[in-house]
Image (tube, rainbow, N blue to C red):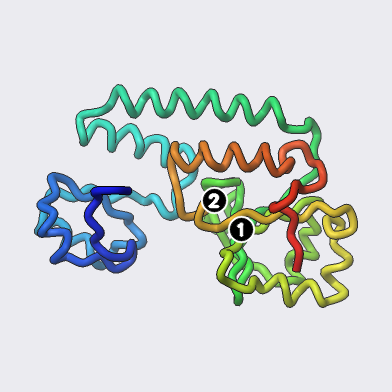
Amino acid sequence: MGGITHTGSRGQPSLEAMAAARPDLILADALVHRDSAAGFARLAPTAVFPSRRADLDELNNQTLQIGRLVGREAAARQLLADQKTLIAKARAFARKNAPTFVAGVVTPTSFTVHTQGSFAVPVRDGQTQFETSLEGLVALNPQTPVLFTAPDEKPVTDTWAKNPLWQKLSAVKRGRVYTFERDDWTRGRGPTALKLMTAQAIESRFLQDAAPARGYQYQP
């Protein structure tokens, strides 16, 4: 990131810092920047994409669109081609007929399930993500929960783990609860993020449905 001008947080960027950078193009998120995109457009041409809630196909299409906007369509197409190769590599490591899993972002107060329509993992009520309780998780009873947590937070599952219901989960009994850093898996989006996610999915032994490797096993 050396040499890149800092313009503030993703959710609240500084318009003054952005103006000082004299951008030729601004890329914005339809959800995160719904109230500020109009301000961006006064500084430079602005393209707004539904990145935060998009599925993988939509994000791939956005990669191609951004490539065209910045005059690097060939490079964007190469990124997408490389991505197909990565996915094929991941499939080679994946255990056939592996049991079901549930992937979710875990914060100190919530467990948000990522569905098959999300970037990482059927859409429910038009949403790619939805919150669930411990009772809801027990009802799903996934053979393999994948938890996306932040290293500086105490996830709500730490409290759930003290509840007898948690011990009834098939995944807990078989020792298949994985944890990954939330920033890597749910905030980073696109081809670059996918490279990191693929590497960790293989390294953690999640794709093989083997006991989690060191650093990836959830320990309340």
Residue type at numbered disc 1: Phe
* Mark closer to the chain start, 1 or 2: 1
Q: Position of residue 175 (x, y in %)?
A: 85, 54
- Residue 110 sits in quarter: bottom right
Q: Is residue 58 visible?
A: no
Residue type at numbered disc 2: Trp
Name the mark on residue 148: 1
Q: Position of residue 202 (x, y in %)?
A: 67, 37
Q: Between marks 1 and 2, how big is the CA–CA gap?
A: 7 Å
| Residue lying furthest front | 2
Task: Tell me the residue at 81%/76% (across/down).
Answer: 162
Q: Is residue 214 visible?
A: yes
Q: Position of residue 123 (x, y in %)?
A: 57, 51
Label 1 with label 2: CB-CB less than 8 Å = yes
Task: Tell me the residue at 61%/58% (across/down).
Answer: 148
Q: Is residue 86 left or right of residue 187?
A: right
Q: Nearer the viewer, residue 58 or 18?
A: 18
Task: Tell me the residue at 85%/72% (across/down).
Answer: 165
- Residue 198 sits in quarter: top right
Task: Tell me the residue at 22%/60% (across/down).
Answer: 37
Q: Is residue 107 left or right of residue 61?
A: right
Q: Position of residue 61 (x, y in %)?
A: 38, 35
Q: Quadrant of the C terminus?
A: bottom right
Query: Badge 2 is on which residue?
Result: 185
